Image: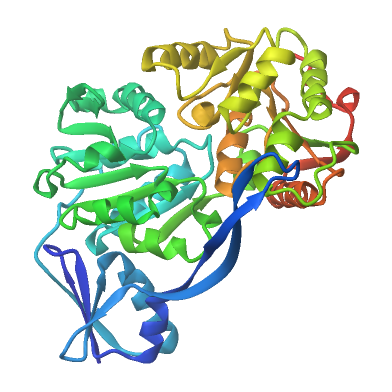
Amino acid sequence: MIEITADCESGFLKIYPVIPEIIDELQFVYKHWDYTGGMAPSPDGKRRFFKKQKKLVLEIKQLFLDQDDGSVITHNGLGARVMDALDRLEVPYRYSKIGDWVKPTLTSSVIHDLDHKQVDAVCNLLAQGEYGGAMVDFCTGTGKTRIIAALIKAFKGARIVVATYNVSVVRRLHEGLPEFVSSEGIEVGICHGGIKDIKNVTVCTFGTIDYLSPETVDVLIVDECHTTTGDGVSNNLLKFVKAIRYGLSGTISDRFDGKERILEATFGPIVSRFSDQEAEEAGRVCPLKVYFLSVPDGPMLDGCTSEYRIRHGIWRNKKRNQLVKDVVDKTPEDQQVLVFVTTLEHLNYLVKDFLPDFEVCHGQLSNKERLAIEERFNSGEAKRIISTDCLSTGVDPKQLMVMIDASTIKGEAAMVQKRGRVRRWAPGKTHGILVNFMDEWCDPLHAKAKKRFKEHENRGDQMFLGSKAEEIDFVKV
């Protein structure tokens, strides 16, 4: 008989005795790049730069500590994984716990106005509280704010922190949550920058969490929890060992290199999913038509570094940037279009020579300026906008019809967040338009484009390969 003991005070799980199969469940292969390099001349011979060489390194990461008595100690969030493994192996075990946890109250008001998927998610989350918490994987536009509100109502009277990585998302949650919880007498405060309005429910950024005492938090709810896999943030969250921890995101299932196990150690298992296809079939989000425009010609960049290739092949590529303008020119004037770039350099280049009438949003604007453009963007008043990642999360632009990704997206999680902006449902909106580029003229950039194409295809988007701007099926409202 294997003894599994959860300590609600320490947040750890003790397993005794240990069998090899459990060790396999509590470790993973972590992949990362090992960089080396030195100074090398640029292609034009006029300057020198640091040339990186990278090698893929595989490391075994362990999520447990060996004890002298033959047991192991691991995170209580991994309890479900351990017990599932023992059930599969038909190995008997006994589960017990030390201490107590804040118990929720499931009333009719908690699940009021939730659809069946959201009710299922809330009930499954609350059922896992005894084991430290749990996660839900709901795509953008499926009502994660309502789920957070339901959790708050279920723990009425508890000290609750709702955390996320982005100030824009903090503002959205602070504005949206009172709509669902104020009738219960629950006040929602905010804490970021110079603003400190602490209530029994407080919305804050990860940076603010550094200054919170673990003793002051009963329940920790993390929105966009996929952003917490870095060592710094995940360690800060794990200090709240006495708190029940819930994670919500639309990109948990897209984690790679074993990082989903870090998430599971922090929050617990994924207990409910709502995929893009399910949300589309349920009419919660709009279908997406994705056009990868053909770019057969470009500058000669063979043998250049990746940085040089992206700067001159993407950001300063006149033919490619002209295609961005061509799509904008063909978009109906009364429809909202958003151009995404990854750098301020590319933004300035496009605005200067191709999109002079566009409003801009980037990280160097003041909070007041960014808030103003976000409000104009969400309301649909601003029709032509170019932005860095500032507008990839924390905004709800229901009238956005066309999104152009003018740069190369880094990672599938970023792609999912950005495509979610144009999938918001609105009356008369039959589909969203997303425009990308194939970059056939450059083998490395073409390989990245094919990967992006595959990621969209896997998401169930309607794909159009090698299109021209005049072939785009713009929404007719």
Counting labels gives 0
- Image quadrant holding the N terminus, namely bottom left
Query: Is residue 153 placed above or below 20 in the rendered structure?
Result: above
In this rendering, position of residue 27 left or right of residue 294 = left
Residue visible at 57% across and 7% down in the picture? 381
- Image quadrant holding the C terminus, namely top right
Q: Position of residue 345 (x, y in %)?
A: 60, 26
24 and 40: which one is in front? 40
Query: Is residue 316 placed above or below 213 in the rendered structure?
Result: above
Q: Quadrant of residue 26?
A: bottom left
Q: Position of residue 420 (x, y in %)?
A: 58, 35
356 and 255: which one is in front? 356
Residue visible at 67% across and 21% down in the picture? 349
Residue visible at 46% across and 75% down in the picture? 59
Q: Position of residue 328 (x, y in %)?
A: 76, 17
Residue 428 visible, this angle: no
Query: Is residue 177 placed above or below 415 in the rendered structure?
Result: above
73 and 103: which one is in front? 73
